[in-house]
Image: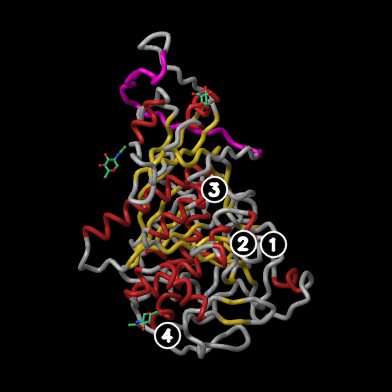
């Protein structure tokens, strides 16, 4: 693995629109002596105020050091407030810390450290929040389409009722509003980069609803776990994303160990987020998750450019075993904003997607983006995992299988599919083939027309469902 040999200083400039919030870690600061001569045994050579970097230890070093040992060489320790994360899972070890050139010079000389990379910002991969009538779409596209994408009178067809039961779906995003009605108690928040478990943005709740919500989602019986790496503005740091993946690998390993014969089908990570440059630390963390046996579904990004220029999108297509997902509209047309190219595996619905939202247990919102496309495939994978233990254990095989059953709609566009070709078809409204009862019951939670009404013009862009109680 080349990256294990290289030491990378990513000198990327990003617009940082918010302050880095360092959690107050309250521990005893253990003063250690630096490897080289220092003025006094009690003075640390570490200076605060540096930029955050991600450091990964070389597993292939003759004697791979512990994280604590590397920190010690830098006059740091896990309790130091400049150390924001320690990564410790079966696939990689390292840490994220704010460091100045002194530390970076020391790290550059350590042959047992495989990577040092500056933390960069990441942002969610949605394009716009739509509440436009279909006529505006009509005048802004030359494609035909059938039905109103904001109606909810379509039919979901599937082969059995497992719908992802036993599959663990990890949503790495802004958090999840777990009390939303579509989650029926199946969702929980497990981890947050800043300790705050609330979804203050709505994006993560929307993504989770599509992946595994009832009524609105694909794998409606899966376990849904919120792993929060993005903040209330939908942005964040690459180091938080790496820490989130680190968390998921650890939890997956412990689930595998603690529930060998029970109802644990496997794990899938869903990442609806994208950077504006490739980020080696994210690539490496995704590779580690995949080799730990965790399926990883990622957004292509919304920059209308080659998906290989963004992370984690660059880990998919012909470039890795992640599944990278672009967005199409109701007409099977790639969205104007979607990234594309050899890093994209599949396209999935990503324009005018109705899903769960924050604020109240029946709130929904209509969003567009590769963020919305990604969880459709996450759901397909979660369902497939629950139905096939061979696929569940093997992300590479799963990727092959999901690509194989996808529908080729021409022009190089493969559209994600759950294996059912003879499902409902026609003018927006689709015939029911299977699972009819489930969906009728589910929709009875909404108003008589099966849709939602606009609640407030001025205070929110969200749509409030007029639920029958
Ligand atoms: C990392 O995890 C291993 C196994 O759980 C444990 O033995 C070790 O002490 C951990 N190291 C750190 C630095 O937390
Ligand atoms: C790193 O190694 C080089 C060459 O061995 C040496 O000249 C330099 O002083 C070292 N730097 C640090 C910070 O140890
Ligand atoms: C599981 O998937 C593999 C790979 O696609 C396939 O060969 C196998 O027949 C499937 N097993 C079942 C029980 O469907």
Say which residue label 1 marks.
337
- Which of the 4 image quadrants contains residue 142? bottom right
**Place of residue 273 in the rendered image (x, y in percent of width and height, measured from the top left):** 55, 54
Residue at image location 43% in from the left, 73% down from the top: 397
Q: Residues within 10 Å of mark 3 (few under 14, many from 20)?
A: many
- The earlier-in-sequence mark between 2 and 1 is 1
- The earlier-in-sequence mark between 4 and 2 is 2
What segment carries the magenta color?
13-37
Say which residue label 2 marks.
369
Q: Residues within 10 Å of mark 2 (few under 14, many from 20)?
A: many
- Which of the 4 image quadrants contains residue 43? top left
Say which residue label 4 marks.
436
- The CA span between labels 4 and 2 is 29 Å
Q: Residues within 10 Å of mark 4 (few under 14, many from 20)?
A: some
The residue sitting at the top extreme is 39
Say which residue label 3 marks.
280
């Amino acid at each position: 693995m080349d990256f294990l040999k290289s030491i990378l200083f990513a000198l990327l400039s990003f617009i940082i629109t918010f302050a880095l919030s360092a959690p107050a870690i309250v521990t005893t600061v253990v003063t250690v002596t630096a490897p080289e001569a220092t003025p006094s045994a009690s003075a640390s050579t570490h200076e605060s105020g540096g930029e955050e970097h991600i450091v990964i230890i070389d597993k292939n070093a003759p004697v791979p050091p512990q994280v604590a040992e590397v920190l010690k060489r830098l006059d740091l320790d896990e309790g130091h407030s400049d150390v924001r994360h320690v990564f410790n899972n079966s696939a990689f070890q390292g840490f994220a810390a704010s460091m100045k050139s002194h530390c970076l010079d020391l790290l550059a000389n350590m042959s047992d450290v495989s990577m040092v990379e500056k933390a960069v910002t990441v942002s969610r991969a949605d394009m716009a929040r739509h509440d436009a009538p279909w006529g505006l779409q009509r005048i802004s596209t030359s494609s035909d389409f059938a039905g109103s994408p904001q109606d909810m009178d379509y039919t979901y067809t599937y082969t059995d009722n497992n719908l992802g039961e036993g599959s663990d779906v990890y949503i790495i995003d802004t958090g999840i509003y777990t009390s939303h009605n579509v989650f029926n108690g199946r969702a929980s928040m497990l981890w947050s980069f800043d300790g705050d478990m609330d979804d203050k943005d709505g994006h993560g709740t929307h993504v989770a609803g599509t992946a595994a919500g009832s009524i609105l989602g694909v794998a409606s019986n899966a376990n849904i776990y919120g792993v929060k790496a993005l903040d209330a503005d939908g942005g964040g740091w690459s180091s938080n994303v790496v820490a989130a993946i680190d968390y998921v690998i650890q939890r997956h390993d412990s689930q595998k160990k603690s529930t060998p014969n029970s109802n644990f089908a496997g794990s899938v990570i869903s990442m609806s987020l994208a950077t504006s440059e490739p980020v080696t630390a994210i690539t490496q963390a995704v590779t580690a998750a995949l080799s730990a046996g965790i399926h990883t579904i990622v957004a292509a990004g919304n920059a209308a450019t080659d998906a290989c220029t963004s992370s984690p999108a660059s880990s998919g297509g012909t470039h890795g075993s992640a599944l990278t997902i672009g967005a199409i509209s109701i007409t099977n047309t790639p969205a104007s904003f979607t990234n594309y190219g050899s890093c994209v595996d599949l396209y999935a619905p990503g324009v005018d997607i109705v899903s769960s939202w924050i604020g109240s247990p029946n709130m929904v919102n209509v969003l567009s983006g590769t963020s919305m496309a990604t969880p459709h495939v996450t759901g397909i994978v979660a369902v497939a995992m629950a139905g096939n233990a061979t696929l569940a254990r093997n992300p590479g095989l799963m990727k092959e299988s999901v690509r194989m059953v996808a529908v080729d709609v021409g022009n190089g566009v493969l559209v994600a599919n759950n294996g059912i070709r003879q499902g409902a078809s026609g003018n927006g409204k689709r015939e029911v083939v299977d699972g009819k009862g489930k969906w009728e019951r589910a929709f009875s939670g909404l108003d008589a027309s099966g849709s939602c009404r606009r609640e407030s013009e001025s205070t929110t862009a969200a749509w409030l469902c007029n639920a029958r109680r």
